[in-house]
Image (cartoon, grey):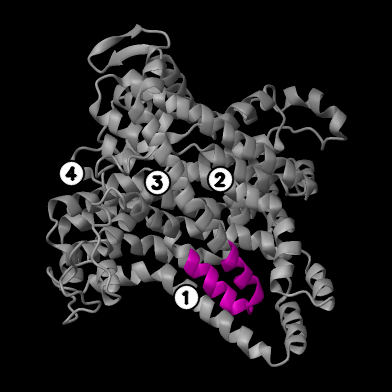
Amino acid sequence: MSTRDVMTLEQEGIIGTMEKPPKAGRKMKRSKARSSGVMPYLMVLPALVMLGIFVIWPAVYAGFLSFHDWSFYKDPAFVGFRNYANVLKDPLFWAAVRRGFIFVAMTVPVMLVLAFLFSSLVVSVSRRFASVLKVSIYIPTIISAVIASIIFVLIYDYSGGLLNALLGVFGVDPVAWIGDPRWALFAIAVPAIWLGMGLTSLIMVAGMIDIPQEFYEAASMEGANWWQKTFYITLPQMKNILLYLLITGFVSAIQQYELPLVMTGGGPLDSTTTPNLFIFNHFRNDMNVGYSIAAALLLFVVLGSISALVFKFVNSERLVD
Amino acid sequence: MAQTTLPPSADLENTSAKTKHDRGGAWWFYTIGKAFFGSVFVVVALFPLAWMVIAGFKSKTEVISTPFQFFPEVWKWENYTQILSDPTFMKTMGWTFMGAILFTLLALTINSLAAYAFARLDFRFKSALWVIVITTMFIPGMTILLTSFVVVSDLGMLDSLAVLVLPGAASAATIFFIRQFYLSIPSSLEEAAMLDGCSRFQIFWRLFLPLSKAPFVVMGITTFLAYWNSYVWPIMTITNPDMYVVQQYLATFRSERSTELGLLMAGSVLAAAPVIILFLIFQKQIIGNIKMAGLK
């Protein structure tokens, strides 16, 4: 189809500006660079301009504001590291960070174990059943946090919710899942796992399929059972994928704030105020913007460097493939 | 990639035949066990959605009632017909849909142009610009949320289509994903076209675009989904109720009309329907590319 297009192009006489013959080798690249003309710049320009306006400039500006005392009503005044110091001294900030880690501990391990069991199942069943499994696990992933919140808030309802009704069958007293500070974070972890399972599972399935089948055949020949195959073949072979999923799972779980924002608004008693929700609520209520921005930047330094490391790791791993 | 390395189904059957032989009578046990656990996964994954659909058929008081009832006393279509005939809801759906289409087209255009240039062309400062693009991938949304708001409000974009469509359109992750794909296209195709006198842009337009269906589908759906599901950015930048996007509408509905739960459920079902349908149509491509898409 492509050569046909090129031919019609010629017939129609839409022949482009003179281009040089194909490159002879990598060595010539540098001298060719100039002759590509303005076309490459025109092609990257829209993306660069938009990234510049909506990502790079806001990031630079955030860096600038974090050293200033500023609100929508007054000019920025330089205060040095005061905002950062205030954030680091704030027990509420640390409480939110601690809560973020608890939330990670509630979601990521469960998700990894479930996804592992799921993908072990997927690779061992017939193709048709496997695709039914894959499609159903992925459907929740495309649901929005708002809809997931609405569904789960009603499931958790104290007097009329499904969960308490179900537990009532076993004689368990109703629990105010999202109204009780002891349970609220847990109640938010469940929809978070539900929404996040799809991608985690499918990446794991993809990794598991890549393991050479001969390993398992050889192991079967020696009489290995499922546990032995899992511990001596599957897990070691999937080390990189598991590490990748662990880190990306960590980064996305610690940044979760949409679910608590819609489900509880961070309450009760701040029990669901994750680090990002802490910052977001500050944005909306606090006059001292510098503080929130400093907090956001502190988080960025940590999360941004973790993501960069993951990216570097994944990229180098891909080169090996 | 996942799909290409998947052994043909014949192989799978072979291995299962072997284990069948090894395990003798236990084979049935394993098959039933797998079917059981598979069904559990499917049911657990889809249950909340099924519950939402069923709740859409319930009356106001039935959605959360004591004693709890899973199925409605009488199945009613009223909630669905009522929300479908609600002009505000339909306008919100249409408005969000239009925005999502525009956003997706814009994103695919600018990101694929940049991806092509970074994958296939040589130009001065290319590697420096590439580093800049990739760096933007690691800036968490929360860090720039407030300053992005300041930027769009300085540009006078609040309460407009522009504020919903422009800021997220250029995306380093999308550029990266499409660039990876373009790097894998053999350069002999390009060289032949160049010998025929095609310009670089013509090569992109007549050669690369037609080949880009797979990455475009994956990135197109991802982009569409991101727009359709976005909530925080709209609540910050859209204050005019006439311009609410669908997630914003649902959240507001929940807080302001909290007694009409059946209606809210029906509305949520309809708001989720477009993306589920879209996913079901393209699920093969999306799931096939998941490993790469996950690495963004």
Q: Chain of mark 3?
A: B
Both marks 2 and 3 on one chain: no
Q: Chain of mark 4?
A: B
Residue at the disc numbered 2: A248
Q: Which residue occupies 41% across, 8% down?
A: A80
Horizontal placement of A2 versus A133: left or right? right
Q: Find residue B121 and report its horizontal and vertical position in percent.
A: 70, 34
Which amino acid type is shown beneath numbered disc 2? Thr
Q: Nearer the viewer, residue B16 or A176?
A: A176
Both marks 1 and 3 on one chain: yes
The kind of secondary structure element at disc 1 is: helix
The kind of secondary structure element at disc 4 is: helix
Residue at the disc numbered 3: B102
Query: How far is disc 4 from disc 3 in space, using C-alphas?
Result: 21 Å
Marks 4 and 3: which is nearer the front? 4
**Marking on residue B241:** 4
Q: Find residue A22 and report its horizontal and vertical position in percent.
A: 82, 38
